[in-house]
Amino acid sequence: MLERLFPKNEHVIERALRVLLGLALLALVFTGPKTPWGLLGILPLVTGLVGSCPLYTVLGIKTCRS
C-alpha cells in the first residue's frame, strides 16, 4: 500500500545528495545566519531518506532503475 503512495523513484546517489543537502540546510538553523529558512532542509532530507519524491511521482519522473 505504501509503495503506491511513495514509489521508489530516486537513484541512490541522488538520495545521498538530498540527505546531505537537507542536513546542510538544517545546520543553518543552528549555526551561520540562524534563519528559519534552513527548515526547508527537512524536505530534501525526508525525500532522500524515504527514496520517493512526490513531485517526481506527479510528473512521472524516475531516476532509479526498475
Image (cartoon, grey):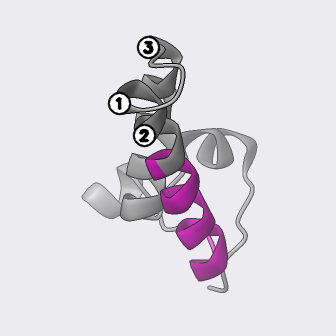
The residue lying at 35 percent from left, 30 percent from top is 30
Neighbour tally class for label 1: few under 14, some 14-19, many 20 plus, Cα within 10 Å? few
Task: Report the residue marked by disc 3.
Answer: 36
Q: Is residue 60 left or right of residue 11?
A: right
Outermost residue to the top = 36
SS category of the residue bearing label 2: helix
Residue, disc 2? 27
Name the amino acid type tagged 2: Ala
Which residue shows up at 44% across the image and 13% down it?
36
Task: Point out residue 39 in the picture as x, y percentages from the top left corner.
Answer: 42, 25
Residue linked to disc 1: 30
Contact? badges 2 and 1 (CB < 8 Å): yes
Give how far apart the Cα atoms at labels 3 and 1 are: 9 Å
* Residue with the most extreme front position: 32
Instruction: Using the image as rendered, state which of residue 52 and residue 66 is in the foreground.
Output: 52
Residue 47: x %, y % from top left: 46, 51
In the rendered structure, which disc, 2 or 3, sits on the residue that comes first in sequence? 2
Task: Indicate whether residue 10 is drawn in magenta.
Answer: yes
Give the spatial CA distance, label 2 vs label 1.
5 Å
Is label 2 in contact with label 3 (beta carbons under 8 Å)?
no
